[in-house]
Image (cartoon, rainbow, N blue to C red):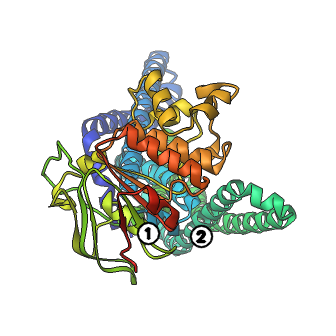
């Protein structure tokens, strides 16, 4: 499982200089910590027992200096670690975000939003924390462990053997609980994602809940999700406690053994009091790196669970690749589906479909609901690529063009358009950030939504609301159309974009769009035959 961490290396590598700096500072701080117990021996044997004030003063000054240096170094390494850690976290999230933008709509249709958010937020945070912290912690603890071991053996090898006699039992206990802990962490992560998904879905469907008087039912369901999360949390906490408490208890028993045997050595004159105090100081500090290393192993195991959940998103393949190199600088707008077959998984939607959309014309593509009309639109803007056959633009396979060029020239307005929780102006400028106020008003007028906007209390500054739900379905469609018109596309695909409008308004709207884009190819995909009257061409590929 720990081999999964090789996937994190690409995100750590760009920051290797900063990581090495953090590690170097941390190691110096670790070495300064090793000097303190040794000075304790000198303080007792060389100063206190001999009643030597000069030695006492010298050792005290050294202790103060080492303490101050250690404090400064630890503060510096902590600051730099936090900075590097935040950069690594952002790099991972940005990479995943960019990857998600390449995934097809079908992925988001079958994957809960809360699940995606949980993996981007909680799981990546856990992976970043463990990955960035592990290297530094392992090195510093190993160095401290080696240094302490050497000095303890130097002080008294037999006493060292007594101090580590019970260590194998601690290691066995830790390993015993790691498998259980990993399973509990996976369950906890899933339960957390379930709560997030339930909340998002409930808040998005609040109108449905209250209109069907299902508030209490949803509250009960939420209580059930929360109970499942709490149960998983308690199981994980108990296992985590046992994984730490048992080794801690065993290691504490070894301290009692050191007191007993070390005291005998002092009584027998084989060890000085200062030597015993120094040994005990190293021994007590020895427990910390041992427990830390056990804890790091535990964190690595649980982090690997999170990493596997994140990796599952990265392993989801995009529906299209951006391998085309041909530039699309000028577009006539002739579209063609040539012998196209397409399937969602094993469900075939299109079978050897042939469609020709002439350039510069208004074309209506008719077909019943569920026949694959929206799939054709998705293929034309390369949200998907066909299983076989080709989609051509001006006689060239879309896959030969650069993907950004295709989507710059070919635009689509969906039946259920999405508006962000932002002002009307910000929603319109999403397609054209540099558009002036006058251009916004002109696009709104061409989409016949300007009068509605002007009547709003704050006009273009009015907030559209979450997913645009503060405006009606017809208004969302026309706002989405205005947003797309700001791009002045060469090809405009309207996928049931006026389904919420009456026939007269629909005809007037199409005419207005035609005036706005007199040379563009306009393809209207619909199941309504009354739109055929306003088209130059009518296509019925589904019979």
Where does the image place residue 107, in percent across and percent down from the top left?
45, 66
Find disc 1 in the rendering and name its residue.
Answer: 366
- What is the spatial separation of the Cα atoms under label 2 and label 1, in whole angstroms? 48 Å
Which labelled disc corresponds to residue 187? 2
Category of crowding for the residue at label 2, using alpha-carbon neighbours closer than 10 angstroms: few (below 14), some (14–19), many (at least 20): many
Q: Residue furthest front?
A: 533
Sequence order check, earlier mark of 2 and 1: 2
Relative horizontal placement of residue 465, taking residue 426 as reference (left or right): right
* Cβ atoms at labels 2 and 1 below 8 Å apart: no
Say above or below: 326 vs 365: above
Q: In which quadrant of the rendered image does the N terminus lie?
A: bottom left
Where does the image place residue 520, in percent across and percent down from the top left?
30, 46
- Tell me which residue sits at (48%, 44%) in the image: 481
* Front-most of residues 524 and 226: 524
In this orientation, does residue 450 appear? yes
- Tell me which residue sits at (17%, 47%) in the image: 328
Where does the image place residue 511, in percent across and percent down from the top left?
45, 45
Secondary structure category for the residue under label 2: helix
**Quarter of the rendering containing residue 7:** bottom left
Say above or below: 215 vs 350: above
Where does the image place residue 473, in percent across and percent down from the top left?
63, 51
């Amino acid at each position: 499982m720990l081999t999964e961490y090789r996937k994190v290396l690409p995100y750590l590598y760009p920051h290797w200089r900063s990581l090495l700096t953090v590690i170097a500072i941390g190691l110096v701080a670790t070495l300064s910590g090793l000097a303190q117990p040794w000075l304790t021996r000198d303080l007792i044997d060389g100063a206190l027992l001999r009643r030597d004030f000069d030695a006492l003063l010298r050792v005290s000054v050294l202790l103060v200096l080492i303490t101050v240096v250690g404090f400064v170094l630890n503060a510096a390494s902590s600051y730099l670690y936090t900075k590097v850690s935040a950069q690594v976290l952002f790099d991972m999230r940005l990479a995943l975000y960019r990857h998600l933008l390449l995934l097809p709509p079908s992925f988001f249709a079958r994957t809960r939003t809360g699940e995606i958010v949980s993996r981007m937020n909680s799981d990546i945070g856990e992976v970043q924390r463990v990955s960035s912290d592990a290297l530094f912690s392992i090195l510093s603890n190993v160095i401290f462990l080696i240094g302490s071991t050497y000095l303890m053996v130097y002080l008294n090898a037999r006493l060292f053997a007594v101090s580590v006699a019970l260590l194998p039992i601690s290691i066995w206990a830790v390993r015993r609980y790691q498998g259980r802990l990993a399973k509990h962490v996976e369950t906890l992560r899933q339960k957390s994602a379930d709560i997030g998904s339930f909340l998002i879905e409930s808040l998005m469907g609040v109108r449905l809940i209250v209109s069907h008087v299902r508030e209490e039912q949803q509250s009960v369901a939420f209580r059930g999700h929360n109970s499942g999360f709490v149960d998983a949390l308690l199981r994980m906490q108990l296992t985590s406690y046992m994984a730490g408490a048992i080794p801690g208890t065993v290691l504490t028993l070894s301290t009692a053994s050191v007191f007993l045997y070390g005291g005998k050595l002092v009584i027998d004159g084989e060890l000085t009091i200062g030597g015993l105090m120094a040994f005990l100081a190293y021994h007590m500090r020895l427990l910390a790196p041992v427990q830390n290393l056990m804890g790091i192993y535990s964190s690595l195991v649980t982090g690997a669970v999170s990493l596997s959940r994140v990796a599952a998103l990265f392993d989801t393949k995009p529906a299209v690749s951006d391998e085309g190199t041909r530039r699309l600088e000028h577009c006539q707008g002739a579209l063609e589906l040539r012998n196209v077959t397409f399937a969602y998984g094993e469900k075939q939607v299109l079978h050897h479909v042939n469609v020709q959309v002439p350039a510069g014309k208004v074309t209506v593509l008719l077909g019943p609901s569920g026949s694959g009309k929206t799939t054709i639109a998705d293929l034309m803007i390369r949200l998907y690529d066909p299983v076989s056959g080709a989609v051509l633009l001006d006689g060239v396979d879309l896959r030969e063009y650069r993907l950004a060029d295709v989507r710059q020239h070919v635009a689509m307005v969906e039946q259920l358009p999405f508006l962000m929780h932002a002002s009307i102006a910000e929603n319109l400028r999403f397609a054209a950030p540099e558009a002036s106020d006058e251009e916004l008003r002109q696009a709104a007028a061409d989409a016949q939504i300007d009068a509605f906007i002007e009547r709003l209390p704050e006009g273009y500054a009015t907030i559209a609301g979450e997913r645009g739900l503060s405006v009606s379905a017809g208004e969302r469609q026309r706002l989405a159309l205005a947003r797309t018109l700001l791009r002045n596309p060469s090809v405009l695909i309207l996928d049931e974009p006026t389904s919420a409008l009456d026939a007269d308004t629909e005809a007037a709207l199409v005419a207005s769009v035609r005036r706005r884009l007199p040379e563009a190819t306009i393809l209207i995909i619909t199941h309504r035959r009354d739109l055929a009257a306003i088209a130059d061409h009518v296509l019925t590929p589904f019979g």
